[in-house]
Amino acid sequence: EAGVAQSPRYKIIEKRQSVAFWCNPISGHATLYWYQQILGQGPKLLIQFQNNGVVDDSQLPKDRFSAERLKGVDSTLKIQPAKLEDSAVYLCASSLDRAGQETQYFGPGTRLLVL
Amino acid sequence: GDSVTQMEGPVTLSEEAFLTINCTYTATGYPSLFWYVQYPGEGLQLLLKATKADDKGSNKGFEATYRKETTSFHLEKGSVQVSDSAVYFCALRRTGNQFYFGTGTSLTVIP
């Protein structure tokens, strides 16, 4: 079974530029998550989708971050404009939306450096 | 709100030493509890989980018991190896599939 795919793996941009990340979850997984992991901290949930609907985006900085999951499969996360404090690893994860199948499976992450 | 608190690291142990990493949680209802591990240069992987009180999760010699009375889910291993060097994250899942992670505990095992 293929895992969660993310691209790019690394990105370096200057502040005020825009950047987009892509995620392809495990086939059949209804729930998709985007996390921000700042160096030395645990993952912080940015947004959670169930199919193509948003379940939780309470910690997403909506003035600069946006995300979409068209057709309930792939997802993109965008930052526009980026700030220095956005430097982090952006993790995508997916899970089955089924009792007893709560495990999240994580992608390798996209490491973003904002200069 | 729901949250997870882990013991701070870093933790350094000699090979074959006993490991305990403390984790306590705050949650309404009955969350599921997880330990995830992040090896150097790799993504987060599920290590073990427990879905109800008194359940014990185990994998690769690691164990953790879901203690509702103390709201804890401490990670233990009887004899650590160099290959166990990684960052360990405690997490809880509440209804609605929402996850909360601790800050992580870095473990280094020296030969």
Image (spheres, rainbow, N blue to C red):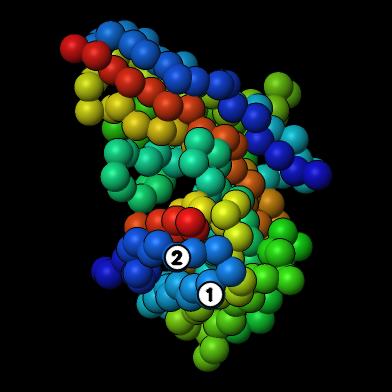
Residue A22 quadrant: bottom left
| Same chain letter for marks 1 and 2 | yes
Q: Is residue A109 left or right of residue A60?
A: left
Question: Of the residues shown, which amino acid type is indicated by label 2?
Answer: Ile
- If the image is split into quadrants, where does the C terminus of chain B sit? top left
Q: Chain of mark 2?
A: A
Residue B36 x %, y %:
44, 41
Question: Of the residues shown, which amino acid type is indicated by label 1?
Answer: Ser
Would residue B57 be visible to someone looking at this image? no
Q: Taking B7 as reference, is B53 above or below it?
A: below
Would residue B77 be visible to someone looking at this image? yes
Is B47 in front, or is B50? B47
Mark 1 vs mark 2: which is more N-terminal? 2
Q: Residue at x 35, y 71 (%)?
A: A7
Q: Taking A107 as reference, is A16 above or below it?
A: below
CA distance for labels 1 and 2: 8 Å
- Is mark 1 in CB contact (under 8 Å) with mark 2? yes
Is B76 in front, or is B87? B87
Residue B42 x %, y %:
30, 47
Q: Residues within 10 Å of mark 1 (few under 14, many from 20)?
A: some
Q: Residue at x 42, y 16 (%)?
A: B11
SS assignment at label 1? loop
Q: Disc 1 designates what residue?
A: A18
Q: Disc 2 designates what residue?
A: A13
SS assignment at label 2? strand
Residue A73 x %, y %:
47, 83
